[in-house]
Amino acid sequence: MEEKPEKLIVNGKRLDGREPGELRPLKIQAGVLKRADGSAYVELGGNKILAAVYGPREFHPRHLQQPTTATLRCRYNMAPFSVSDERKRPGPSRRSIEISKVTREALEPVVFLEQYPRAVIDVFIEVLQADAGTRTAGITAASVAMADGGIPMRDLVASVAVGKVDGTIVLDLNKYEDQYGEADMPIAMLPRKKEISLMQMDGNFTPEEFRQAIELAILGCEKIYEAQREALEKKYSANLGGE
Ligand code: CDP
């Protein structure tokens, strides 16, 4: 890993030139995989993430079926080539198991699971290139993939991290900021209800910083939500055009 930069904020700007409240460049595409029922591709700064959704379909083995609702299964995985150093070994790790769990919890509140008793909905998130904020970008991608797959949903889920670097509250931390900053708080939000379905915390905030950070996260999620909807509209209007 490169050395710690002396300062992460210089003249009010971050090392990558962003304002504290600015997202990295964001690109979302819906419906990128033929075989999956729904799919999406997200680029956020240096993150490149694919999400694929299968189902609702019959859940095997049967003893795992839930009699009154569908089961949402999420698998977050980092490709072995997604990070630059030697830290990533192929296969599940403690970290990816934790992220898979919080991803499921972040997405579950929007899905009408009760419409498909006994079924399973599978959500696969593959990180092809990682640059901090992969769990949140993965949730953003997964909710677009679920909508693309026609899964009945109350809303999308938009997700981004906020944090503190050099004492400043910032949106969407990059890898340096994630590694050398003082706090990192991934947030997922149901934008229409303004409900929060994921909140984790690494580091610490004062109560006032926490309030600022939440406000910034809400603004960030609103921007992401717009891009998510645009991606779905684009795919939908292309289909209507007979593509
Ligand atoms: O990606 P996210 O911020 O949600 O999770 P994290 O555990 O805070 O990881 C931050 C970043 O560290 C990742 O996005 C990767 O860029 C990097 N990382 C890595 O280089 N090797 C790993 N095995 C895990 C993470």
Image (cartoon, grey):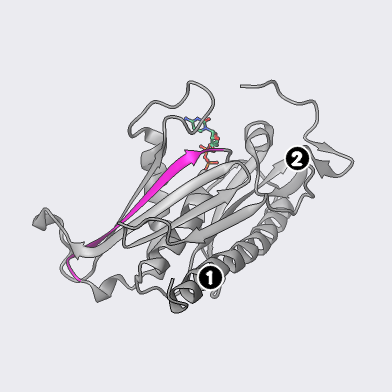
Q: Residue at x 56, y 43 (%)?
A: 47
Q: Which disc is residue 16 wearing?
A: 2
User: Considering depth in this image, is 63 or 86 the residue closer to the camera?
Assistant: 86
Q: Which disc is residue 146 wearing?
A: none
Looking at the image, residue 237 sits to the left or right of residue 171; the answer is: left
Vertical order, 12 against 111 (above or below): above
Residue extending farthest right? 11
Question: What's under tag 2, amino acid-wise?
Answer: Asp
Q: Which residue in the structure is indicated by mark 1?
A: 234
How many residues crowd mark 1 within 10 Å: few (<14), some (14–19), many (20+)? some
How many residues crowd mark 2 within 10 Å: few (<14), some (14–19), many (20+)? few
User: Considering depth in this image, is 118 or 17 the residue closer to the camera?
Assistant: 17
Looking at the rendered structure, the secondary structure element under dot 1 is: helix
User: Considering depth in this image, is 199 or 43 the residue closer to the camera?
Assistant: 43
Q: Residue at x 46, y 63 (%)?
A: 144
Segment tinted magenta in the rendering: 117-130
The quarter in which the C terminus is drawn is: bottom left
Q: Are discs 2 and 1 less than 8 Å apart at CB?
A: no
Q: Residue at x 39, y 64 (%)?
A: 146
Looking at the rendered structure, the secondary structure element under dot 2 is: loop
In front: label 2 or label 1? 1
Q: Is residue 126 magenta-colored?
A: yes
